[in-house]
């Protein structure tokens, strides 16, 4: 069985949490309920990704986001 959804990993380790990763995760979860993103992405919370100095950190496929902002990540997802 082939997975059609892209994985979006959000680090929720202690340093990322201090930088607002939980709020970021919740906002992104809300965004993913929009028709535009529905069924296309799988949002996953992770433990520390060992890049704490760049917190908050997110990973989409093979792309690392340092000091991630929701607009930046959504712009990346809209790219073909
Ligand atoms: S806590 Fe997020 S990279 Fe370490």
Image: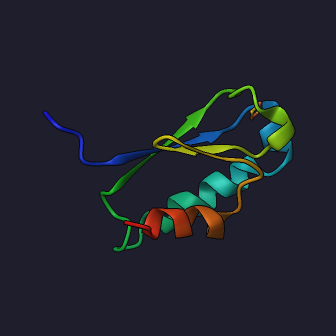
Kindly indicate the quadrant of the structure image that contains residue 28: bottom right
Residue lying at 66% horizontally and 27% vertically, measured from the top left: 47
Q: How is the image coloured?
A: rainbow
Ligand 1 shows up in the quarter that is top right
Q: Is residue 36 left or right of residue 76?
A: left
Q: Report the label total.
A: 0
**Can you say whether 45 is above or below 80 in the image?**
above
**Can you say whether 14 is above or below 61 in the image?**
above
Observer-nearest of 30 and 10 = 10
Kindly indicate the quadrant of the structure image that contains residue 40: bottom left
- Direction left: furthest residue: 1
Q: Quadrant of the C terminus?
A: bottom left
Q: Is residue 75 left or right of residue 33?
A: right
Q: Is residue 41 left or right of residue 64?
A: left
Q: Is residue 12 left or right of residue 2?
A: right
Residue lying at 71% horizontally and 27% vertically, measured from the top left: 48
Residue lying at 79% horizontally and 52% vertically, measured from the top left: 20
Residue lying at 70% horizontally and 43% vertically, measured from the top left: 57
Percent across and percent down for residue 10 are 61, 43
Percent across and percent down for residue 27 are 61, 63
Percent across and percent down for residue 76 are 52, 63
Q: Quadrant of the N terminus?
A: top left
């Amino acid at each position: 069985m082939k997975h059609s959804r892209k994985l979006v990993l959000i680090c929720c380790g202690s340093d990322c949490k201090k930088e607002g990763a939980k709020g970021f995760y919740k906002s992104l979860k809300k965004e993913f309920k929009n028709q535009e993103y529905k069924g296309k992405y799988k949002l996953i919370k992770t433990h520390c990704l060992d890049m704490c100095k760049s917190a908050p950190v997110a990973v989409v496929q093979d792309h690392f986001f340092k000091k991630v902002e929701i607009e930046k990540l959504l712009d990346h997802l809209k790219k073909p």
